[in-house]
Amino acid sequence: MAPLIDINTVIPNIPKELVKCLSIRYLNHLIGYIWLFEKSETNYYILHMYVSKKYRKLGLGTLAVHELDNYYLDRGFLTAELLVSGSNYLGLKFWTSVGFDKIIYVEAPEENAVTSSVELELKKELNSYTQKQRVYLIPITDDNKILGQSLNVTDEQVEAKLILNVPEAIEAAEERPKCARPFFIRLNNTIIGYTAFVFDEEIGEERLRYWLWQFMIDEKYQNKGYASLALEEVIKYFKYKDVQYITLSTTPTNNNALHLYKKFGFYETGEMNDEEVMLQKKLY
C-alpha cells in the first residue's frame, strides 16, 4: 500500500487545517485510509478513499463508510458529499450503494483536458440512511473465525437439525475455498450471526450459480427484526455483484425461515435439493 502523503498535492485549494486523514483498520491490520474535511458543522466531505488491493471486494470499504457515517451522525451531522468521475463506473456503483444517491453538481471537463469525462458531485442524507444500516457483513478470515464459537442457535433448531453450529459451518465453507464466501453478521460492534454464499461459475445453468448457502442469527438476537436487516444486506451484496438470481434451500418444516424468505420475495421453485425445498429470488 502506498498511501497518499499530502492531499494538497491533488486538491491544492483546500486549507490544510480543515483536512483529516483517517486510517481504515480491520482487526489489527492497516488496510487503507480516508481523506476528508468538515465542510460545515453539519456536513462532511470525502476527498479520497483508498483500500489496499488485498482487502478489496470483501465489503470492508462499505463498512468503513458506514462507520464514518455513524461517527458523524452521533455528532449531529446531517449530510455527506464527494466528487466522482462520471467515467468511473465502479466508483459510481460503490458510492451509490452506500447512499450517495443525489447529484448536486455536474462539472464539465476543461478545454484540452486529458479526459472528456464530467465530474459528479454526490450527496447523501445521514439521518435516515445511516440509522437503517447498522447491520453489516464481515468477511471471515483465519484471524477472526474464532468469533464463531460465541454464536448459538436454540435447542429446537439443533434438535430439528435446521442449522449447523457455526464452527462446523465455517469449516464446511473452508472446504470449498474457490466458491464459498463466509461472513459474520455484525450489529454495531457485536457479532450476532453467520451467513455464507456460494458463487460457482462452473454450474451450467446461470440461475443456479449463486446461492445463499447458510444463514443464522444467534438465539439472543432472534425475533427482534435483525434477521430481516441482515437479509437486506445479503440481497444488497448479491446486487452489488450483478447477480440475477439468488437460490437457497431449506427444510419444508422450517416455517420461520420460509416466512422470512418469502417476505423478501423468494418463491418456491417446485424443485428439491435433496430433502430441502428450493427457493429463488430474481433481482433483475
Image (cartoon, rainbow, N blue to C red):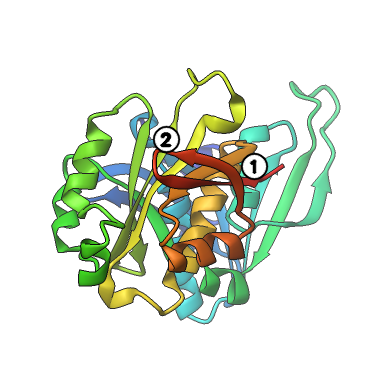
* Relative horizontal placement of residue 186, taking residue 38 as reference (left or right): left
Local SS, label 2 = strand
Between 167 and 72, the residue placed more toward the observer is 167
Give the residue number, with chain letter if any, for mark 1: 93
Q: Position of residue 268 (x, y in %)?
A: 59, 50
- From this viewpoint, is residue 188 visible? yes
* Relative horizontal placement of residue 23, taking residue 200 as reference (left or right): left
Of marks 2 and 1, the one in the foreground: 2
Residue at 47% x, 80% y: name it: 75
Local SS, label 1 = helix
First in residue order: circle 2 vs circle 1: 1
Q: Position of residue 137 (x, y in %)?
A: 40, 54
Q: Tag 1: residue type?
A: Lys
Q: Position of residue 179 (x, y in %)?
A: 38, 28
* Relative horizontal placement of residue 170, taking residue 198 as reference (left or right): left
Residue at 78% x, 30% y: name it: 117
Between 18 and 262, the residue placed more toward the observer is 262
Q: Tag 2: residue type?
A: Val
Residue at 55% x, 54% y: name it: 46
The N terminus - image quarter: top left
From what the image shows, is residue 89 above or below residue 13? above
Between 181 and 94, the residue placed more toward the observer is 181
